[in-house]
Image (spheres, rainbow, N blue to C red):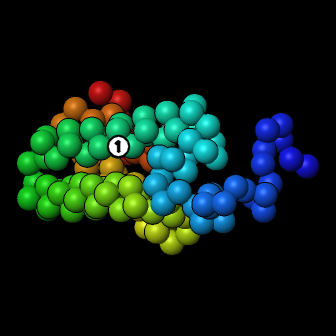
Amino acid sequence: KRLFGETPEENLPPGHFPVRIYGTHNILLEMALHVGLPGLALFLWLMVSLGRTLIERFRRATDAHARAFLLGAGVGFIGLGVRLQFDQTLVGTLAVQFWVLMAVAMAACDSLPGNVPSFAAIFSKKYKAP
């Protein structure tokens, strides 16, 4: 059943292309069309928060390995951001690799000064509250 105002893609005027078949080739337009402006705002908030956290943790890291890993995660984050401006496929293996890389980057630097202890550390028997 079609929604109100939805035009069947086979009845498009000449010179127009169906968006659902060919895609928008831009993650921001794709999110706005498929999940609406609130979903786009939530996606942008998530990406900006993740980027700011990577930068903050990179600046605070003193260990060379942590800095190198965070630099690699940051470059991957920027690269994916550029790629998604020309493609909308943040699904499948690409999405899994991206989110695992970001999770490992956040977890690897859990021991930086001033960080809140991780969930696993709080519930382990060895954890002592500050």
Q: Which residue is mark 1?
A: 50
Pinpoint residue 68: horizontal percent, then vertical percent.
14, 61
Farthest bottom residue in view: 93
Q: For residue 103, which quarter of the picture?
A: bottom left
Q: Is residue 13 left or right of residue 69?
A: right
Looking at the rendered structure, the number of numbered marks drawn on it comes to 1
Pinpoint residue 95: horizontal percent, then vertical percent.
49, 63
Q: For residue 125, which quarter of the picture?
A: top left
Dot 1: within a 10 Å radius of its alpha carbon, few (fewer than 14), some, or many (20 or more) residues? some
Q: Is residue 72 left or right of residue 42?
A: left
Residue 98 in sight? yes
Q: Is residue 123 left or right of residue 86?
A: right
Q: For residue 108, which quarter of the picture?
A: bottom left
Q: Is residue 3 left or right of residue 117?
A: right
- The residue sitting at 91% across, 49% down in the picture is 1
**Amino acid under label 1?**
Leu
Please state which of residues 65 and 82 is positioned toward the viewer in this rendering.
82
